[in-house]
Image: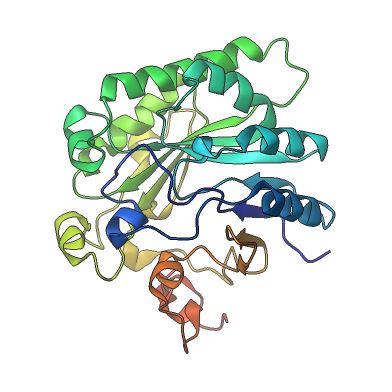
Amino acid sequence: MDGFWRITLLTNPDVCNLHCALCFLHQRGRSYGKGEMPWEVAEKAVRTYAARGICEVIPSTMGEPLLYSHFGKLESLVQELGLKLNVTTNGSFPGKGALAWARELLPVSADIKVSCWGTSQKSFDILCPDVCFSTYLQNLKTLAEERQKLLPGSAENLSRLSLQMAVCKTNREDVERAVELAAELGFDRVKLNRAVFLSHSQALKEREELLPEDYFDRSAVESLPVKLEGTFLYPATEAPRLECCPFFGRELWILPDGSTEPCPDPGNRFEGLSQGKNRCEICHLFPKRFFSPDSN
């Protein structure tokens, strides 16, 4: 066994129905350019790493994974192999709508993470102008309500539900309400990460980057039954020390052509910043200050 516990398939990195300001492809200003992953590539990767002991498969975290033309085959394959999907969706539930997607995804997923740009139409208009907040909110309610309906008679472990928020200046004041909303809906977890900016998106960075000392004081919502995770739960200058990267050697990214990447850092993937350098020294996700002085 090679130590990987899950893999990410970049199934359809350039295919999305939204145009979000913080999206790495939007920041980059052009497509990833590798096309959609052929089913043969996806099936081979899943079967290969299932035999090596993985537990989960993540369909594309770029683009909208529910738009992958072979998504139904992927659902069937993970069920056949006793695996689970781990899905990050933009919450629009394209094509089938929230109810049908909820019924499909809940039994076959370990986690369904729904991206959250804020808790008001004002925040959505700036960060994700294609989305009507009231429609988005109804989709969240439908997903949560369907899980509650399925729980009593389900013979399978139904998916955890998470809200995932990239926190920036525009939605900073929405964070507490987002946690409250997750609790009200019956979601299990909220991931609050500082927004990440590529090196050539300087104007966006200047507009949206938070001060290092800004963070979310979880004591404001500590009584709520929601798990909180993410880099926005502490000042950037006081990040908890990590002994090693949580990704390297434990997760693997499969590109549409079947080649692999060992980490999800957007700078390395989109800008080639790791050429001739130790990519861990210039990681956007876990800067050097995150690591203990004696860690590699």
Question: Which residue is at the front of the view, 118 or 87?
Answer: 87
Q: Is any atom of residue 54 visible in this view?
A: no
Q: Could you tell me residue 218's position as x and y percent?
A: 37, 42
150 on left or right of 212:
right
Residue at left 74%, top 39%? 78
Image quadrant holding the N terminus, namely: bottom right
> How many marks can you see?
0
Q: Could you tell me residue 265's position as x and y percent?
A: 46, 66
Q: Could you tell me residue 248's position as x and y percent?
A: 61, 69
Q: Is residue 219 above or below residue 288?
A: above
Residue at left 26%, top 33%? 130
Question: Which residue is at the front of the view, 162 or 61?
Answer: 61
Image quadrant holding the C terminus, namely: bottom right
Q: Is residue 236 above or below residue 123?
A: below
289 on left or right of 124:
right
Residue at left 26%, top 25%? 132
